[in-house]
Amino acid sequence: MSALHILWRDEHLVAVYKPAGWLVHRTGLDAGETRFVMQTLRNQLGQHVYPVHRLDKGTCGVLVMALHPAAARSLSQAFEHHAVRKDYLALVRGWAPPAALVDHALRPDDAPPDAPVQDARTALRCLARLEWPEAADPRFATTRASLVHAMPQTGRRHQIRRHLKHIAHPIIGDATHGKGPLNRWWADRLGGQRLWLHAWRLQVPHPVSGEVLALHSGLPALGDSQAAVAAAAPPAEGLQDLAGWRSLWQCGGWRLAEGEPQPCETAPTPRETKSS
């Protein structure tokens, strides 16, 4: 089993790069999987590790584990009380709006239909748009996609994926909430089937000092300045996930979003969102 790439570590917590396709811990819902962050990291460090948040199996990027029970309690409370900032990158269908705040309550995936919904909010900002010179849909001459910066303000399961579906811009490669034919079309052009969702940055208060730790996956954003690239954590060389994202940046046809970031507004409904 390959060792996990460590982004940051002290005696209280460790941040690792979670590869796509790995589960955070064992679960009966995916009994055939053999790659688990908890067990691999425990063996790698030679000590117990404690999960304090989660990433979906298909999502790659920054994942934090506590190294003792007190740190686990402190970090878990920080996530529970929204004292952390989470930044994701997503490749989505169509041309996303410049900025939006999706305020759309969600019912847990495994809950009965009459279960109460839970508040859920995600701020979105479009970083760049791509026009691919081939048509996935014969009604259009080209195929459009967007690079979206997603900032969840609550922590519901599959929140970013479900919110992007809600505004008619599902994540490319999302087998549950996306479009199967479109996912397969993009997989043929981007080198394989995968969920294009990346846990890019995480700011979390240190469980002992309270100092805010700024953790970075090592992936510069499309269009980042050289200074921003230099300020990012050293890239995890050899990781297929990062190589795939960097290859995506090399695709012709990207247009960076113009101007300064705009304030997030309430997201348009699917009827108001134009995409191809």
Image: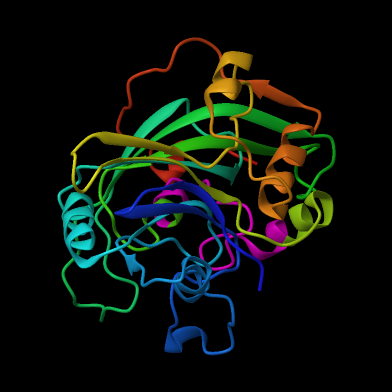
Residue 109 appears at what percent x and percent y? Answer: 34, 73
**Residue 195 as seen in the image, left or right of residue 15:** right
Q: Determine the residue positioned at 34% across, 63% down.
A: 157
The C terminus, quarter of image: top right
Above or below 112: residue 274: above
**Residue 109 as seen in the image, left or right of residue 186:** left
Q: Determine the residue positioned at 70% across, 45% down.
A: 237
Give the colouring mode of the picture: rainbow
Residue 123 appears at what percent x and percent y? Answer: 34, 36
Residue 11 appears at what percent x and percent y? Answer: 32, 53
Q: Determine the residue positioned at 59% across, 67% down.
A: 175
Range of residues picked out in magenta? 162-183
Above or below 231: residue 107: below
Q: Quadrant of residue 64?
A: bottom left
**Residue 53 as seen in the image, left or right of residue 171:** left
Closest to the observer, 83 or 125: 83
Would residue 273 be seen by someone viewing this image from the given angle? no
Whether residue 11 appears in magenta in the rendering, the answer is no
Whether residue 167 appears in magenta in the rendering, the answer is yes
Would residue 75 be seen by someone viewing this image from the given angle? yes
**Residue 155 as seen in the image, left or right of residue 235:** left
